[in-house]
Image: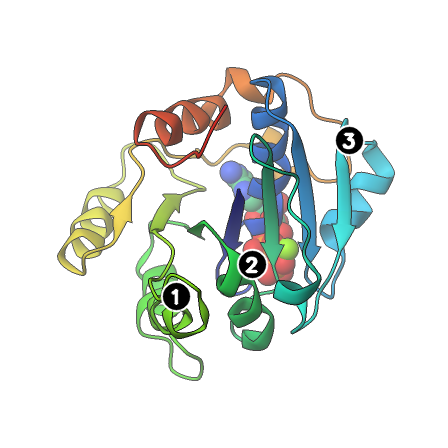
Amino acid sequence: MLIANISPRSMGKTTDTGLMGHAFHEAGYPVKLWDADESEHLTQWFELAGFPFGVEKNASAKFAEEYTPLGDSGIDIVDVGHTENHPHIADSVLKVADLAIIHMEPSMADYQRVHQPRTSTPIKTMVGRSAFDRPSRTAPPLWVLLNRVRTNVRSEKQIRDLLADDDYNVFTVKIPVLDDIKQATGFSVENAARGPFGELVTEMESRGLIKSA
Ligand SMILES: Nc1ncnc2c1ncn2[C@@H]1O[C@H](COP(=O)(O)OP(=O)(O)OP(=O)(O)O)[C@@H](O)[C@H]1O
Ligand SMILES: [Mg+2]
C-alpha cells in the first residue's frame, strides 16, 4: 500500500518519512520509500546513512503511471514535493495513494498554510479532487500527524479542536519536538519503532489503515 506524506514546505515530511519507514521496517513490514521531491533530501539521507530498504526517486507528474508497488504486504511511503510549488506531483501521487497524511506542527501558522493557504490549493481540496482520477472514484483517507509538538502548550489542544471542527482525522500519537529528531536526516536510524514512530505504526494498524501485515 502507498502512504503519501504531504504538506506545504518545511513541515517535517522528509524527517517523518525516513523515520516512519524505519519504524515499519522494524515492525516487520517490507518497506520502500519514494522521493517525489525535487530537492532529493530523502535520497541524500539514504545515500549518507544507508537504509535497510530502498529509496526510489520520482518527482514528476507521472508518478502515478510510473509507480510500481511493493505488493500486498509491503509499505510504500512517498515524500511528496511540497504542495505550495509542486501541486502537479501531489495530484499525481494522490491518484494512487491508499492513505494521505498531512504533516504539520500544532501552530496557527501551519494550520493556516494547510487549511487556508493564500497562494496555493488547500491539501484537503487536492485530496478531494483526486477522487475523479481514481478507479474507485473515492479519495484516499486523509489523516493529520502533528509533529514538532512541544509539551505544556495550549496550542496543541486548540489546533486539534480546529482540525476536528474542519472534519480532519488526527492521529492521537504525536511526534515531539526533539533535537534527536531534528538532527535525524543524514544519519543512520536505530530503534525508530521504540519511540513515537513505533506508536504511530501501532495506531495505524489498530485503526485499520494498514492493508496487511
Ligand atoms: N520532531 C522534530 N523535532 C525537531 N525538529 C524537527 C522535527 N521534525 C522535523 N524537524 C525539523 O524541521 C525542519 C523541516 O523538516 P523536514 O525537512 O523534514 O520538512 P519537509 O516538509 O520535508 O521540508 P521541505 O518541504 O523543504 O522538503 C527541519 O529543520 C527538521 O530538522
Ligand atoms: Mg523535504
For the residue labelled by badge 2, is the local secondary structure a helix, a strand or a loop?
Answer: loop
Q: Quadrant of residue 40?
A: bottom right
Viewer-side residue, 88 vs 117: 88
Residue 139 sits above or below residue 122 on the image: above
The residue at the point 37 percent across, 68 percent down is 131
Cα separation, mark 1 vs mark 2, equals 19 Å
Image coordinates for residue 91, horizontal then vertical, percent: 52, 71
* Circle 3 residue: 51
Marks 3 and 2, the one that precedes in the sequence: 2
- Please name the residue that numbered disc 1 is placed on: 127
State the residue in front, 4 or 191: 4
Above or below for 172 versus 91: above
Q: In this image, 149 relative to 86: left or right? A: left
SS under mark 1: helix
Amino acid type shown at disc 2? Ser
Q: Residues within 10 Å of mark 2 (few under 14, many from 20)?
A: few
Q: What type is the residue that disc 1 sits on?
A: Val
Among the two numbered marks 1 and 3 on one chain, the one whose residue lies closer to the N terminus? 3
Q: Residue at horizontal 73%, vertical 66%?
A: 38
Instruction: Point out the tag, 1 or 2, that comes first from the N-terminus.
Output: 2
Task: Work out how far the residue at label 3 is from the one at label 2, CA to CA, in angstroms.
Answer: 22 Å
Query: Which structural element holds mark 3?
Result: loop
Q: Which one is nearer the viewer's eye here, 176 or 192?
A: 192
Residue where numbered disc 2 is placed: 10
Does the beta carbon of the residue at mark 2 sit less than 8 Å from ligand 1? yes
Instruction: State which mark lies toward you, 1 or 3.
Output: 1
